[in-house]
């Protein structure tokens, strides 16, 4: 009996051990995420970032390919053939006689000069690697900003849900009062009907907001690499985040021009275009290759009058070639790449102008949202006081139900406006940090 108990406990402990077959969507079921933790999880699991990482690794491999052209090419070569004449003829060259032949050996070649094509290709591949690094950083910035905006949208929806639920409770209280007044004959029954209609509308708003919350959670799950039905807990409050920006307009613009990855991509793309032009222009220059052969050859004649032979030899030399005329392809290719580089330069200048405008607009949005927060809070205080006064007037039969319902609606709208202003402020901050090229996952 004791052995059976020990064996049962062992089985329970073994079953409780974690398995390694959990997928990313089920690992940590019901995990809790702050905004900063959500951004960190998205950076690890989102396919868009993983794709850019793989593209960066590919670009690094291309650098190795470009470097390989500065090293010699070594190959093993072998040939075999049979020369068979239709009829034996008199010849002064026994190489033309019927024979069996083979050759084998080692062949090496080294490109000594290729019109600077190898050097330009190497430099181009390194610039391309820098571009892929910038694109990876841009993908991280975009993903982080999207997660933050969706997270803020979720928190705003939760604030709207609180407001909608408070509205429902207020209307229910009003409905009870209206029913009591109507029962005693102190107010018409139409007051009850109006409250019932407003209650139904408030309950519909609760349903809509709950659906908005679920939609926001599903979108966040997608960013974080979870399945739509994954029940993560996203925690936070709109009032928890810093209101600090810490940049003047001039500092923000300088920061953006210095570290925005999309500007780096645009600038490096111009450099790549010029490298392509130089590669095409290299076709006007000669090619020089060094070669070395270490071979064994054999010939076996069919005619017994001739003795076959086998010999071993090495040979070294230089190969020189120069395409004097190629139908104008190199000329037109160089001109086309030059035009492309000029167009990309204009795109880069436009991107610089756009970056300045983005930063300035983001700062304007922050300042406007800050003012909205101040006025919306005053609006909530005024609307709440107005509602309390209208409610007292209605309970003392001085005010009307229309006045009370209007005051209730204004209070609900004022609360929604306050939540919207706070969400807009932090959303503007998230976009601001994106526009200056700075990762700030916790909006600190």
Image (spheres, rainbow, N blue to C red):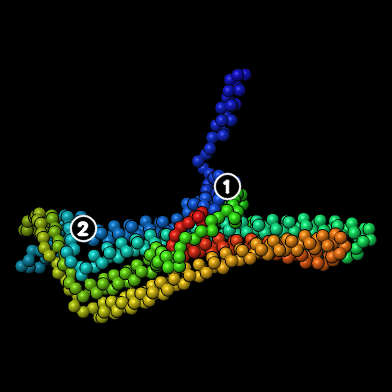
Q: Residue at x 92, y 61 (%)?
A: 186
Earlier sequence position, callout 1 versus callout 2: 1
SS at circle 2: loop
**Left or right of 141 on screen, residue 25:** right
Nearest-to-viewer mark from 1 and 2: 1
Task: Give percent across and percent down for residue 90.
Answer: 7, 68
> In the rendering, which numbered label is found on residue 71?
2
Q: Which of 255 and 403 is in front in this view?
A: 403
Q: In this view, does 288 lie above or below 224?
A: below
Q: In this view, does 211 lie above or below 28?
A: below
List the single residue furthest toward the right: 185
Quarter where residue 80 is shown: bottom left
Q: Residue at x 77, y 66 (%)?
A: 406
Image mark count: 2
Q: Nearer the viewer, residue 225 or 235?
A: 235
Task: Give percent across and percent down for residue 378.
Answer: 66, 63
**Left or right of 293 on screen, residue 3:** right
> In the rendering, which numbered label is found on residue 32?
1
Residue 145 visible somewhere in the drawing: no
Residue 431 visible somewhere in the drawing: yes
Q: Nearer the viewer, residue 296 or 200?
A: 200
């Amino acid at each position: 009996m004791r052995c059976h108990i020990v064996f049962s406990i062992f089985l329970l402990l073994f079953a409780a051990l974690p398995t390694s077959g959990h997928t990313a969507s089920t690992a940590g079921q019901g995990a809790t995420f702050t905004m900063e933790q959500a951004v960190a999880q998205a950076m690890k699991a989102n396919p868009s970032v993983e794709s850019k990482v793989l593209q960066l690794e590919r670009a690094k491999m291309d650098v190795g390919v470009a470097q390989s052209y500065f090293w010699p090419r070594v190959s093993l070569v072998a040939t075999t053939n049979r020369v068979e004449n239709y009829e034996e003829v008199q010849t002064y060259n026994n190489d033309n006689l019927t024979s069996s032949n083979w050759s084998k050996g080692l062949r090496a070649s080294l490109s000594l000069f290729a019109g600077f094509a190898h050097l330009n290709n190497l430099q181009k591949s390194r610039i391309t690697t820098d571009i892929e690094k910038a694109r990876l950083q841009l993908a991280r910035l975009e993903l982080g900003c999207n997660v933050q905006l969706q997270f803020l949208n979720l928190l705003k929806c939760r604030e709207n849900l609180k407001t909608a639920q408070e509205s429902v409770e207020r209307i229910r209280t009003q409905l009870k009062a209206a029913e009591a007044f109507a029962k005693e004959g102190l107010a018409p029954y139409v007051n009850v009907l109006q409250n019932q209609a407003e209650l139904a509308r408030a309950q519909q708003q609760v349903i809509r907001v709950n659906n908005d919350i679920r939609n926001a959670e599903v979108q966040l799950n997608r960013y974080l690499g979870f399945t739509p039905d994954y029940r993560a807990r996203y925690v936070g409050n709109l009032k928890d985040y810093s209101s600090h920006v810490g940049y003047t307009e001039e500092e923000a613009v300088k920061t953006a021009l210095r570290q925005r990855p999309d500007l780096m991509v645009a600038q490096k793309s111009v450099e790549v275009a010029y490298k392509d032009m130089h590669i095409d222009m290299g076709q006007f220059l000669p090619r020089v290759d060094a070669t070395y052969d270490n071979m064994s050859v054999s010939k076996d004649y069919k005619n017994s009058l001739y003795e076959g032979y086998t010999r071993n030899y090495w040979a070294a030399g230089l190969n020189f070639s120069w395409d004097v005329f190629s139908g104008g392809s190199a000329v037109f290719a160089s001109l086309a790449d030059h035009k492309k580089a000029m167009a990309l330069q204009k795109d880069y200048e436009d991107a610089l102008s756009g970056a300045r405008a983005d930063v300035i607009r983001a700062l304007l949005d922050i300042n406007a949202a800050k003012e909205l927060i101040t006025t919306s809070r005053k609006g909530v205080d005024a609307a709440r006081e107005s509602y309390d006064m209208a409610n007292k007037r209605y309970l003392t039969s001085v005010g009307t139900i229309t006045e009370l319902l209007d005051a209730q609606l204004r209070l609900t709208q004022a609360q929604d406006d306050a939540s919207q202003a706070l969400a807009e402020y932090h959303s503007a901050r998230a976009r601001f940090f994106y526009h200056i090229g700075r990762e700030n996952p916790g909006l600190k």
